[in-house]
Amino acid sequence: MTVSGQLGGQGESLAGAVSEADLRESMGRIRRYCDPYRELLVRPEQGTRLVQMVEGLTSVLERKSVEPIALMHGVERRNLQQFVGTSKWDYDPLREQLRREMAREIGSPDAALVLDGSATPKKGNATVGVARQWCGRHGKVDSCVVGVYAVYVGLGGLASIADSQIYLPPAWAEDRERRAKVYVPEDVQYRSQPKMALEMTRTLAAELPFEWVLGDDEFGRSREVRDGVWALGKSYVFDVPCDTRVRLVGHKKIWRVDAMAKSRSIRKWKWLRVRDGEKGPCEVVALALPVMTERDGAEAVAETLVVIEEPWDGRITYCLARSRSPASLSQLVQHASQRHRVEEVFEEAKGEVGLDHFEVRAWHGWHHHMTLCQLAHWFLVREKRRLGKKSSGPDCEHDQDGYWSSTVPRDNRQDGVAGELPPGAERGRPPSPLASTWINRASPPAHAVNRADFSQ
């Protein structure tokens, strides 16, 4: 009774309905799946504990912390507690092995790396990193632990967590006594979440093939992050706050991005279908403008402002983008839309493998739990792929175990060529009615705008 719940029961969202034979085969594959990771651990009993944890994390247990998993296996709780929470086995080699598998099986030069932070509510003050800080789950500042994550989105849109690190707030980073109690390494200093994300991207760029880096405005507001990603030879689309200041290429006036978007003619916008959603096609109205963004003590940088509005609820997203090869508005919007995959992965990882069920206090305990959850989630993604729930496509081949791996084509694009869009590029016609971009302007209100107002 392990993986069956995720592939055939409550894990329906990840893998869909499968046969009993498929379930039995998947359950039997866990030990084989864990073999390369067991070999990276020093002692045989650690390998046994790893298998037990992965089986528990992929099981139908409602709570996927150490105690329920120990009860499921009929083993001493403290053995698993020691393995996850206090043992100091090195988790980096396991994560590197995980990324090698990702690169082999879903790797693509056009893949995306999505950066995001996620908070887990925690009471008390003993758990590493716990502090009153923004908690997205509660929608307010609250006591929580924050992790910074990188999700790899590869072939067929398959995605899994490639890396995770705990954010250490300044009060923690500066408190030597508190750090010592939870075994924070001496060389760990305070780093902002954007800086953590950039360092993570540098590491992953050496291990995984990807072209695009995406992230929300926590990372997009940082010029250091955007410039750092570009310096790595990657393209990016980052959300930015609505009060971000830019100027149109060839002009001197400084605009807020929201004001600039409202000032554009209706005929500059295009209606695009982004993807097919559960309730029908997801459509947006979008605009791209070539802009300059200022740098302290340096020349301004040319970027593309992308504004995306969801027509039916009025939600507006502002992005800054740069592409290593020419990219149309449609392509930029498609890449920006991939950012939703990180929320889906978090939902899967928290609901199906207990990503937020950690009950550890120490630095290495948090990273052990995250590593085990990454292994468990990747196992479920591999099983979904093996069972054929996604088409492998023409550029893939199957290995001897029935998994398919990517055949990565050579990337002949010229490095350093920016893909900025000219004014008025990619014009089209949005659906009617339009949403709130058009409200409080000289244009007709949303319900009165029709397709005739847009260029054909």
Image (tube, rainbow, N blue to C red):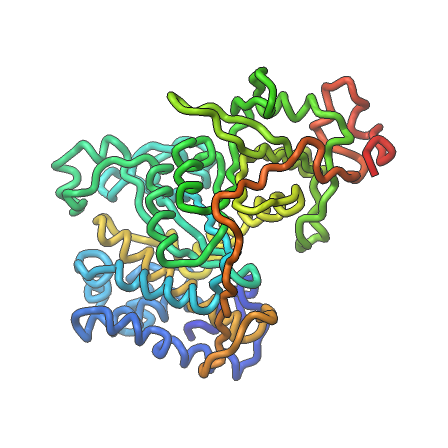
Which image quarter holds the N terminus?
A: bottom left
Relative image position of residue 107 (x, y in whole percent): 47, 63
Q: Nearer the viewer, residue 60 or 448?
A: 448
Residue 247, placed above or below residue 118: above
Residue in the image at 38% along x and 60% along y = 374
Count of marks, rendered view = 0
Quarter of the rendering containing residue 190: top left
Relative image position of residue 100 (x, y in whole percent): 37, 65
- 332 relative position to 195: left or right: right
Residue in the image at 77% along x and 17% along y = 442
Quarter of the rendering containing residue 63: bottom left
- 60 relative position to 440: left or right: left
Relative image position of residue 331 (x, y in whole percent): 63, 47
Residue 148, placed above or below residue 393: above
- Residue with the most extreme top position: 253
Q: Nearer the viewer, residue 67 or 22?
A: 22
Residue in the image at 13% along x and 42% along y = 180
Which image quarter holds the C terminus?
A: top right
Relative image position of residue 352 (x, y in whole percent): 45, 61
Residue 20, placed above or below residue 450: below
Q: Does residue 259 appear in the picture of this structure? A: yes
Residue in the image at 39% along x and 48% along y = 149
Q: Nearer the viewer, residue 232 or 144?
A: 232
